[in-house]
Image: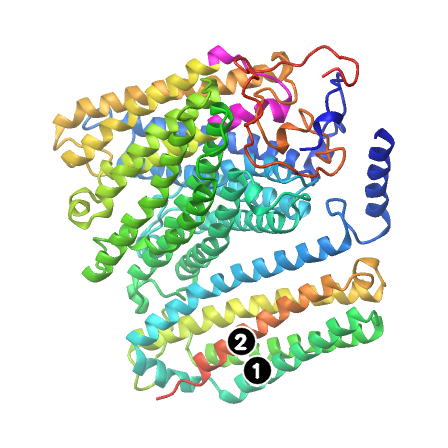
C-alpha cells in the first residue's frame, strides 16, 4: 500500500486526533469517529465495571447455600441488572462501537464514517439510555431478568420495568444507527483498490454484524415497546388478560436476541482473524471461507431462535427444525476455528499479549460452542434448560469469546489508538490470569448445571452438596476480577508513561498500520490507493518483531 | 510529493466550506450514493419495526378470525378510504417535489411539499376523529372496554389493541414525516444550498414519505376490509 514512503518521519508531538484541539466541547461535539470511539471506550468501561460489581454480588451470595447477604427479591434485581448492563450496555456495543468505530474507516482508507453526526447521535443515545437505566435502578431497579418475559413484565412485576425497557429501546436505536453507518461506509467509502475481497476480515465481521443489527434490533425494539404500552395503557398483544399470547413475546424477543449473540460474537471473530494473521505472520487460510462463513452465521442466526423455547410449549416439529438449524450453524463457526488453526500452522507465531488472548479465545470458544450442541439437541436440553449449564455455556461464548477478543483487540490496537505501549510482560501475565480466572469461575458451573442447580436462584439450601462448586466459582471470579482490573491500571498508566510506539509496532499488515500513531484527524495525509492483497505477509519473512517496535529518535527523511 | 499533499488537503478543506459536500466524501456522487444506501438501509429497519406487529396481527387474526371479522365493522371504510386517497395523493405531490428538486425549480418544489404537508395534516385530522369515535364507543382495550355485539371479549379486545398499536405507530411516523417535510420547506424557502444544489435530501424525505404511505396501504385492508 502506498503510504509507507511518506510516513517514515517520526516527528515528536505531531498533530493527531487527540491533541489537535483540547477543549471539552471539541470532544463532546466531535464528529471524528476516533474520538467517538474513545468516548465509547470510557463509557462502556464504566458500565462494565458496574456489571462486574453485580456479578461479584451474585457470586458472594452463592458462596453459602442459604446466604443472607441479599434478600431473594434483591438478588433478582441484582442478576437482572447484571444481565441488562452486560448485554445491552456492554456486549452489544463493546467491539462495534469502540474498535469498529475507531478502525473501520481507517481499515478501508476513508476519512471518517459515512455519517459522522449520526455516529455522535448514536453515542448520545447510548449515554441517554444508560442514564435512564441507572435512573430506573435508583428508583428500585427491575426484577424481570434481562429477558423481560411476559406476562410477568407486562402485568405483575412491581419494579421499574417501563423505565428500564425504554432505556433498552433507546440503546437499540443507538445500535441501529451504528449499524447503518457501518453498512453505508463499507459500501461506498472504500479507498480505490480496496475491493470487497481485500477487506480485512474485521471489516467483513463488522458488515455482517451491522446486517444483523439492522434486521434484528427493530423487532426487539417494537416488541419491548409493546410490553411498555401493555403495561401502562393495557393496549397489547402479550397479556392473556387481553386475549394475547405470552409465547408470542418469546418468539419476537428471541428473533432478535438470538441473532444478538451474533452481534456480540461476530465482531469478536473479526478481531480474532486480525490477531491470528498478525502474530502468525501468514495470510489467513481460506480468506473467502472465513468471510462467507461470517455472512452465513449472520443469515442462519435468524432461523434458530426457537431453541430458546424447547420447553415453552412450541410444537415438537418446530423444535426439531430449530434444533437442526442450530446444529447447522455450528458448521460456519467451526470453519473459522479450523481456518485460524490452519493459519497458525507453520506460521511464525509470536506469543505477544494480543496473541495470548487470541489463543485463549480459541480454547474458550470451542468449549462454549461445543456445549451449545448439548443445548441444541432437544433431549439433553430438557434436562439442562434454565440450569447453570446454560449460564456457563453463554458465559464461555460471551465472556470467553467477546471479552477475550475485545481485550486482545484493545491490546493490539492500543498503540494505534494512543501511540503508547503498555508493559508487555505484565500484560502477558494478566492475559493468563484472565484465562485461569475465567475457567475457574465458569467451568464448575457446567457441573453445577448438570447436577441440577437452577439459574436465577438466590439459594440452594435443599442441595448443600453443591457448595464446593459454588465456592470454586466465586474464587475464580475474584481471580478474574484481578485480571480485568489490571489492564485498567496499566493501560491508564501507559497513556502517560508508556514508551512511545512506532506507527506499526507489530509489523502487521493493513491500512491502519500505515498511518501515523495516533492517527491525524482525517486519518491519512492523502487518500490511500490499495495495490496489494489483504494479509500479504509473503515478502517480510525476514522481518523480526519479537518485541513491539518503539518509536525511534527522529531520523532524516527517507532513511527508513 | 509534499506540495501535492498540501494541495489535496486544501482541496478537501475548500469543498467543506462552499458546497454541500461533506469533508468525509471525495465527491458529490459518492456522497449522494452513500446517502441513498443509508436511507434504504434505514427503511429496511423500519420494515422490520412494523414487521413484528404484522406478525402479531397474522397470529391473532388466525386465532380470533370471527371476532376480527365482526369487530372490523366498527372501523368506517369511508374514513379509511378517504385517508388512503389523501396519502396516495400526497405521495404523488411528494414525487413531483422530488422531480422539481432535480430540475432545481424551488417554487414548484415548495408547492409540491406544501400539498404533501396538507395531506399529512388531513390524514392526522381524520385519524383523530376516528380515535375519538372509538374512545366514545368504549372500544379502547382495558378496564372500560365493551366488546361489539356478537364478539368474545378477548378477541375483539385483541382487534382493537392491534388497531391502536399499528395505526398509532403509523400515526407517529406521519407526524415525523410532517416534521421532516416542514423542515424541508423551510430550507427550500431560504434557498439553502444543502437542498437547492443537491436534490438527494429532498429525495430522502420523499423515500420516507412513500414508505409511510406504503405501510398505510397494508393497514387499510387489514383493519377496514376484512373479508368474511
For the point 28% across and 32% down, which residue is it? A367
Q: How is the image coloured?
A: rainbow
Residue A56, percent across and down?
A: 35, 26
Task: Check chain identity for marks 1 and 2: say if they share one.
Answer: yes
Q: Toward which corner of the image does residue B163 lie, by quadrant?
A: bottom left
Seen from the viewer's position, the closer of residues A489 and A357 is: A357
Q: Is residue A233 left or right of residue A129?
A: left
In magenta stretch: residue B60: no
| Residue position for label 1 | B84
Residue B189, percent across and down?
A: 83, 67
| Residue position for label 2 | B216
In magenta stretch: residue A419: yes
Secondary structure under tag 2 reads: helix
Distance (Cα) linking label 1 and label 2: 7 Å
Q: Are marks 1 and 2 in contact (CB under 8 Å)?
A: yes
For the point 45% across and 65% down, which residue is it? B51
Q: Is residue B112 left or right of residue A206?
A: right
Q: Is residue A210 above or below residue A494?
A: below
Seen from the viewer's position, the closer of residues A511 and A453 is: A511
Judge whether residue A386 can be spotted in this image.
no
Q: Is residue A549 left or right of residue A315?
A: right
Seen from the viewer's position, the closer of residues A484 and A114 is: A114
Q: Toward which corner of the image does residue A70 lie, by quadrant?
A: top left
Residue A467, percent across and down?
A: 18, 24
Q: Which residues are magenta?
A: A407-426
Judge whether residue A184 can be spotted in this image.
yes
Q: Is residue B224 above or below residue B212?
A: below
Provide the chain ID for the residue under circle 2: B
The N terminus of chain A sits in image quarter? top right
Secondary structure under tag 1 reads: helix
What main secondary structure does the magenta stretch of the protein show?
helix
Seen from the viewer's position, the closer of residues A295 and B100 is: A295
Amino acid at each position: 500500500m502506498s503510504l509507507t514512503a511518506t510516513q517514515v518521519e517520526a516527528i515528536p508531538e505531531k498533530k493527531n486526533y487527540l491533541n489537535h484541539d483540547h477543549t471539552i466541547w471539541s470532544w463532546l461535539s466531535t464528529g471524528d469517529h476516533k474520538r467517538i470511539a474513545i468516548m465509547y471506550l470510557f463509557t462502556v468501561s464504566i458500565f462494565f465495571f458496574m456489571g462486574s460489581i453485580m456479578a461479584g454480588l451474585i457470586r458472594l451470595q452463592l458462596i453459602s447455600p442459604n446466604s443472607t447477604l441479599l434478600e431473594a427479591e434483591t438478588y433478582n434485581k441484582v442478576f437482572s441488572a447484571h444481565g441488562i448492563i452486560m448485554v445491552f450496555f456492554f456486549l452489544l456495543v463493546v467491539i462495534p462501537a469502540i474498535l469498529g468505530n475507531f478502525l473501520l474507516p481507517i481499515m478501508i482508507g476513508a476519512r471518517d464514517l459515512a455519517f459522522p453526526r449520526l455516529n455522535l447521535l448514536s453515542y448520545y443515545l447510548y449515554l441517554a439510555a444508560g442514564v435512564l437505566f441507572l435512573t430506573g435502578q435508583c428508583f428500585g431497579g427491575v426484577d424481570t431478568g434481562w429477558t423481560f418475559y411476559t406476562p410477568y413484565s407486562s402485568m405483575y412485576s412491581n419494579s421499574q420495568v417501563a423505565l428500564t425497557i425504554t432505556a433498552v429501546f433507546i440503546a437499540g436505536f443507538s445500535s441501529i444507527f451504528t449499524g447503518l453507518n457501518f453498512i453505508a461506509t463499507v459500501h461506498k467509502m472504500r479507498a480505490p483498490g480496496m475491493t470487497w475481497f481485500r477487506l480485512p476480515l474485521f471489516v467483513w465481521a463488522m458488515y455482517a454484524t451491522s446486517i444483523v443489527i439492522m434486521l434484528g434490533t427493530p423487532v426487539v425494539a417494537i416488541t419491548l415497546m409493546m410490553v411498555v404500552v401493555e403495561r401502562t395503557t393495557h393496549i397489547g398483544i402479550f397479556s392473556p388478560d387481553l386475549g394475547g399470547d405470552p409465547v408470542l413475546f418469546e418468539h419476537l424477543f428471541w428473533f432478535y436476541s438470538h441473532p444478538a449473540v451474533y452481534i456480540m460474537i461476530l465482531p469478536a471473530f473479526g478481531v480474532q482473524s486480525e490477531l491470528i494473521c498478525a502474530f502468525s505472520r501468514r495470510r489467513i487460510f481460506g480468506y473467502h471461507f472465513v468471510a462467507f462463513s461470517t455472512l452465513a452465521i449472520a443469515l442462519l442466526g435468524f432461523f434458530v431462535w426457537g431453541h430458546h423455547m424447547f420447553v415453552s410449549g412450541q410444537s415438537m416439529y418446530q423444535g426439531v427444525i430449530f434444533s437442526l438449524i442450530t446444529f447447522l450453524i455450528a458448521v460456519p463457526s467451526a470453519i473459522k476455528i479450523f481456518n485460524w488453526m490452519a493459519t497458525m500452522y507453520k506460521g511464525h507465531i509470536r506469543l505477544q499479549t494480543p496473541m495470548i488472548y487470541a489463543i485463549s479465545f480459541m480454547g474458550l470458544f470451542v468449549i462454549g460452542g461445543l456445549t451449545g450442541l448439548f443445548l441444541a439437541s432437544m433431549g439433553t436440553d430438557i434436562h439442562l434448560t434454565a440450569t447453570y449449564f446454560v449460564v456457563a455455556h453463554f458465559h464461555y461464548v460471551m465472556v470467553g469469546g467477546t471479552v477475550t477478543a475485545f481485550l486482545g483487540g484493545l491490546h493490539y490496537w492500543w498503540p494505534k489508538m494512543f501511540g503508547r505501549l503498555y508493559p508487555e510482560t505484565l500484560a502477558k501475565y494478566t492475559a493468563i490470569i484472565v484465562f485461569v480466572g475465567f475457567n475457574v469461575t465458569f467451568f464448575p458451573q457446567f457441573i453445577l448445571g448438570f447436577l441440577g442447580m437452577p439459574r436465577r436462584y438466590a439459594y440452594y439450601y435443599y442441595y448443600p452438596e453443591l457448595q464446593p462448586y459454588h465456592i470454586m466459582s466465586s474464587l475464580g471470579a475474584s481471580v478474574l476480577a484481578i485480571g480485568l482490573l489490571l489492564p485498567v491500571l496499566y493501560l491508564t498508566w501507559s497513556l502517560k508513561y508508556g514508551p512511545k510506539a512506532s506507527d506499526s509496532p507489530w509489523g502487521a499488515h493493513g491500512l491502519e498500520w500505515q498511518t501515523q500513531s495516533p492517527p491525524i484527524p482525517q486519518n491519512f495525509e492523502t487518500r490511500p490507493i490499495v495495490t496489494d492483497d489483504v494479509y500479504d505477509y509473503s515478502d517480510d519473512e525476514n522481518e523480526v518483531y519479537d518485541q513491539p517496535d518503539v518509536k525511534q529518535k527522529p531520523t532524516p527523511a527517507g532513511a527508513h | 510529493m509534499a506540495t501535492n499533499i498540501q494541495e489535496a488537503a486544501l482541496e478537501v478543506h475548500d469543498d467543506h466550506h462552499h458546497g454541500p459536500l461533506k469533508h468525509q466524501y471525495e465527491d458529490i456522487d459518492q456522497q449522494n450514493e452513500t446517502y441513498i444506501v443509508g436511507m434504504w438501509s434505514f427503511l429496511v429497519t423500519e420494515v422490520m419495526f412494523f414487521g413484528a406487529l404484522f406478525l402479531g396481527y397474522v397470529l391473532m387474526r388466525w386465532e380470533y378470525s370471527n371476532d376480527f371479522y365482526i369487530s372490523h365493522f366498527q372501523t368506517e371504510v369511508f374514513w379509511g378510504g378517504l385517508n388512503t386517497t389523501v396519502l396516495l395523493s400526497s405521495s404523488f405531490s411528494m414525487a413531483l417535489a422530488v422531480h422539481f428538486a432535480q430540475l432545481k425549480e424551488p417554487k414548484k418544489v415548495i408547492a409540491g411539499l406544501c400539498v404533501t404537508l396538507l395531506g399529512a395534516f388531513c390524514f392526522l385530522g381524520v385519524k383523530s376523529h376516528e380515535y375519538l369515535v372509538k374512545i366514545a364507543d368504549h372500544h379502547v382495550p382495558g378496564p372500560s372496554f365493551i366488546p361489539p355485539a356478537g364478539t368474545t371479549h378477548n378477541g375483539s379486545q385483541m382487534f382493537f389493541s392491534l388497531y391502536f398499536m399499528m395505526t398509532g405507530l403509523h400515526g407517529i411516523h406521519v407526524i415525523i414525516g410532517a416534521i421532516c417535510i416542514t423542515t424541508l420547506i423551510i430550507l427550500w424557502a431560504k434557498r439553502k444550498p444543502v437542498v437547492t444544489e443537491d436534490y438527494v435530501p429532498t429525495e430522502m424525505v420523499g423515500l420516507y414519505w412513500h414508505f409511510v404511505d406504503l405501510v398505510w396501504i397494508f393497514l387499510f385492508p387489514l383493519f377496514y376490509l376484512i373479508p368474511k
